[in-house]
């Protein structure tokens, strides 16, 4: 099905350029020049993505984001602006924006954000679409049945794979731990595919992207008229995953109130949609993931201990890429083939110089960083082998070895570590986050917490 995108942009020429580019990539595009027209379009139509300028002549991109979350929660919102203010970025991501991109930018950068989000789209959206063409709910299939799990050759990878195969056939709740970008959702899908539930739904939920005010509706659904903006009955993630697997990514980001609601659903195996008096029985296996120390969160009373033990019947640790360098070129080959298919290219491999640079780099962003570097490099390569001049500078000029890992438990040093990383990255927040081995969203939160102004 063609993805539908609505653009809200008062710069007519720029809007037309984006429209033309995305239409050539196979997307269905509509555009509004004002916030009011954008609101009307979002209310009356169903879009997969909303791309809006931050500063509009009659509206604010942040307010349009909030409105979209109310009337169309499943629409992913991307904010774009020429005013790269840190506090605005923090607010946008906290309010549920998919991403935040600063002008000027290349259309290919926006396309990569859209394509990545499309691959990880909430499976409940697919449930709704399948139901609309009369597929019974229990016959829902995963968004993609194509296996994307690479079995490494390193000893640490072999042990990791053995754990997945061991716990897969059980119904145990699994907690996947690992650094950002190590492929926790891919591991969760592998566990699901090793189970007897493999022919049922796999529903992935990014807990960090759900505002706490609508979390109950997202997880348990709601009935029409139960609150402002509830114009139709909605099936929640638990019901969508009935008989299958529910994957809770970044589970540590759930509010305390939402943790209580989740715990009750797991204990009772029943849910109650918002506004309904009827409980619904659900049979769901829970796989959760985090790059945080949940035990520390339990000790500081920000994460419930009873929920932690409920989710952690079995723990799987995903090794970082620097811990399994023997597998590096297996992943390179996989991502290279994937990029060639996606971009319509025929790049055969890496030049010798690039191979050496890749081996010396510590890959703090893990598989996600490797995948993005490969895809950008393939896009810019006009020969059979990826040359040195298309590789990001941080990869080329890195020092051999694993590099320092930031311990954020030492709060007295945390602010200075962030400032040092920003200076090292030339105040590029994405690169600074990679140096610190944290997500960009976490960096934004830390900037706000310590009142660091750029």
Image: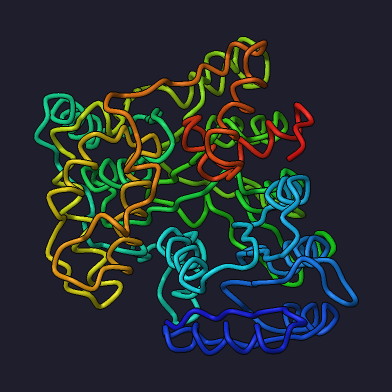
Name the foreground residue: 249 vs 5: 5
Q: Is residue 381 left or right of residue 99?
A: left
Q: Position of residue 184 (x, y in %)?
A: 37, 40
Q: Is residue 7 left or right of residue 143?
A: right
Residue sitting at x 68%, y 36%: 258
In the picture, which quadrant includes the C terminus? top right
Name the foreground residue: 384 vs 212: 384
Name the foreground residue: 22 vs 399: 399
Determine whether 161 is above or below 278 in the image: above
Answer yes or no: is residue 270 visible. no
Query: Which quadrant would residue 39 be assigned to in this image?
Result: bottom right
Q: Position of residue 342 (x, y in %)?
A: 29, 72
Residue sitting at x 31%, y 30%: 320
Residue sitting at x 44%, y 36%: 180
Q: Position of residue 310 (x, y in %)?
A: 48, 23
Q: Is residue 318 left or right of residue 275?
A: left
* Coloring basis for residues: rainbow
In the picture, which quadrant includes the N terminus? bottom left
Query: Which quadrant would residue 158 be assigned to in this image?
Result: top left
Determine whether 99 is above or below 395 in the image: below
Q: How many marks?
A: 0
Determine whether 320 is above or below 13 in the image: above
Name the foreground residue: 91 vs 224: 91
Q: Position of residue 384 (x, y in %)?
A: 13, 69
Answer yes or no: is residue 293 visible. yes
Determine whether 67 is above or below 220 in the image: below
């Amino acid at each position: 099905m063609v993805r539908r995108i609505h653009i809200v942009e008062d710069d007519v020429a720029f809007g037309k350029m984006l429209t033309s580019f995305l239409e050539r990539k196979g997307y269905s595009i509509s555009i509004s020049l004002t916030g009011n027209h954008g609101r009307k379009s979002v209310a009356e139509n169903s879009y997969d993505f909303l791309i809006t300028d931050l500063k509009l002549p009659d509206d604010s991109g942040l307010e349009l984001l909030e409105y979209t979350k109310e009337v169309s929660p499943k629409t992913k919102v991307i904010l774009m602006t020429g005013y790269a203010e840190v506090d605005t970025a923090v607010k946008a991501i906290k309010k549920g924006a998919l991403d935040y991109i600063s002008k000027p930018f290349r259309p290919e950068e926006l396309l990569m954000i859209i394509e990545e989000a499309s691959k990880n789209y909430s499976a409940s959206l697919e449930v709704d679409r399948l139901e609309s063409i009369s597929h019974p709910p229990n016959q829902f299939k995963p968004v993609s049945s194509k296996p994307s799990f690479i079995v490494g050759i390193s000893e640490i990878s072999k042990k990791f794979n053995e754990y997945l195969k061991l716990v897969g056939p059980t119904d145990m709740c699994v907690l996947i731990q690992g650094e950002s970008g190590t492929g926790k959702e891919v591991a969760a899908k592998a566990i699901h595919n090793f189970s007897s539930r493999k022919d049922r739904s796999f529903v992935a939920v990014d807990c960090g992207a759900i505002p706490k005010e609508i979390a109950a509706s997202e997880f348990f659904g709601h009935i029409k008229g139960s609150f402002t903006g509830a114009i139709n009955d909605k099936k929640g993630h638990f019901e969508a995953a009935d008989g299958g697997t529910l994957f809770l990514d970044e589970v540590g980001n759930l509010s305390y109130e939402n943790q209580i609601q989740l715990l009750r659903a797991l204990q009772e195996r029943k849910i109650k949609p918002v506004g309904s008096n009827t409980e619904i029985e659900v049979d769901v296996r829970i796989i959760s993931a985090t790059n945080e120390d949940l035990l520390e969160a339990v000790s500081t009373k920000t994460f419930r201990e009873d929920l932690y033990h409920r989710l952690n019947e079995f723990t799987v640790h995903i090794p970082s890429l620097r811990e399994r360098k023997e597998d590096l070129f297996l992943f390179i080959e996989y991502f290279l083939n994937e990029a060639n298919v996606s971009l319509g290219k025929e790049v055969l491999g890496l030049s010798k110089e690039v191979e050496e640079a890749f081996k010396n780099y510590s890959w703090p962003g893990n598989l996600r960083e490797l995948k993005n570097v490969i895809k950008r490099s393939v896009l810019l390569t006009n020969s059979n082998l990826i040359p040195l001049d298309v590789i990001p500078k941080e990869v080329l000029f890195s020092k051999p070895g694993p590099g320092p890992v930031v311990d954020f438990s030492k709060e007295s040093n945390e602010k200075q570590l962030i400032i040092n990383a920003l200076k090292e990255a030339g105040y590029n927040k994405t690169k600074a986050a990679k140096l610190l081995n944290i997500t960009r969203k976490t960096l934004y939160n830390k900037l706000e917490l310590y009142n660091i102004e750029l």
